[in-house]
Amino acid sequence: MSEVTNQNNKKSRTFGNSFRIAFLMYSRIPMPMADWEAANMRYVMCFFPLVGAAIGAVVFGVSKLCAWLSVPSLLAAIVLIFLPILISGGIHLDGFMDVCDAVGSRQEPVRKLEIMKDSHVGSFAVLGLFVLLLLNLGCWYQIPVECLQVLGIGFVMSRAMSGFLVVREKAARKDGLNAMFSGAAEKNLTKVVLCIYMVVCVVFMLIANIPAGIAACVAAFGCLIAVPIMAKRQFGGWTGDVAGYFLQVCEVAMAIAAVVVWNVAA
């Protein structure tokens, strides 16, 4: 009996550490320190979407506060765009910019991987960031509440899909964050859990608004298919930077699709 209890306690500690590592790695939300040994990283991707849930809740709450305070629409949109960056610490945006630089270089895959590891910011990264922020601003400016609910759930969807690709896709290199989390993950269980997140997100998006929800889901699953194809062609596999790139592209694609379709249907 004591052996079973010890095993349960050990598993609980592993889950607890995985939960804390997910938030410590992918957010700036204060968390108790965790033990970063390999065994405790087995379920990190299972908790990764919960970071998105926290971001979605904050964004939705702040949007309501902005509406209550009659904050000008442009200023409110800027605040809502930067909140996810502030909460996540910009880790995914960093990956997005690295991929923009690497793809823009038009070099061989091996050289592109080297460019992504370079800490310097190139012109393609700046251009990509500008376009991304401008597209987000266009979507979040005077965003209808129905779309706001859909996109709040989208923060969970994008992270569920990003985590799924981390454990499913072949790594382009043996080192880096992607290799670390992918190699340590309990892959079969993680895939099942992340698929459940995706299904739940689809359901709640459709409950929030059917036209906008369908559009956002189509955009998200389109990215789930397209970005891995791009990653294999450009880099020979998946990396942590590509995972960040996917997350940013997926979120802006959902925003564009949801807002455009909602306006057409309205």
Image (cartoon, rainbow, N blue to C red):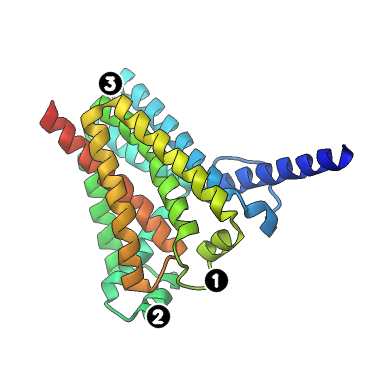
**Residue flagged by tag 1: what amino acid is it?**
Asp
Could you tell me if residue 202 is visible in this image? Answer: yes
For disc 3, the neighbor class at 10 Å (few under 14, some 14 to 19, many from 20) is few
Foreground of the two, 99 or 163: 163
Q: Earlier in the sequence, mark 1 or mark 2?
A: 2
Mark 3 vs mark 1: in front: 1
User: Residue visible at 22% across and 47% down?
Assistant: 135
**Residue flagged by tag 2: what amino acid is it?**
Val
Q: Quadrant of residue 160?
A: top left
Q: Which mark is residue 70?
A: 3
Pointer 2: what residue? 110
Residue 266, compared with residue 105, is above or below; it is above
Q: Earlier in the sequence, mark 3 or mark 2?
A: 3
User: Residue visible at 35% across and 66% down?
Assistant: 231
Q: Earlier in the sequence, mark 3 or mark 1?
A: 3
Foreground of the two, 154 or 128: 154
Residue 248, compared with residue 265, is above or below; it is below
For disc 2, the neighbor class at 10 Å (few under 14, some 14 to 19, many from 20) is few
Spatial CA span between label 3 and label 1: 49 Å
Mark 3 vs mark 2: in front: 2
Q: Which mark is residue 175?
A: 1
User: Residue visible at 45% across and 71% down?
Assistant: 172
Q: Secondary structure at mark 1?
A: loop
Give x and y (percent) for residue 182: 54, 60
Quadrant for the N terminus, please. top right
Q: Residue furthest top?
A: 68
Give x and y (percent) for residue 175: 55, 71
**Residue flagged by tag 3: what amino acid is it?**
Ser
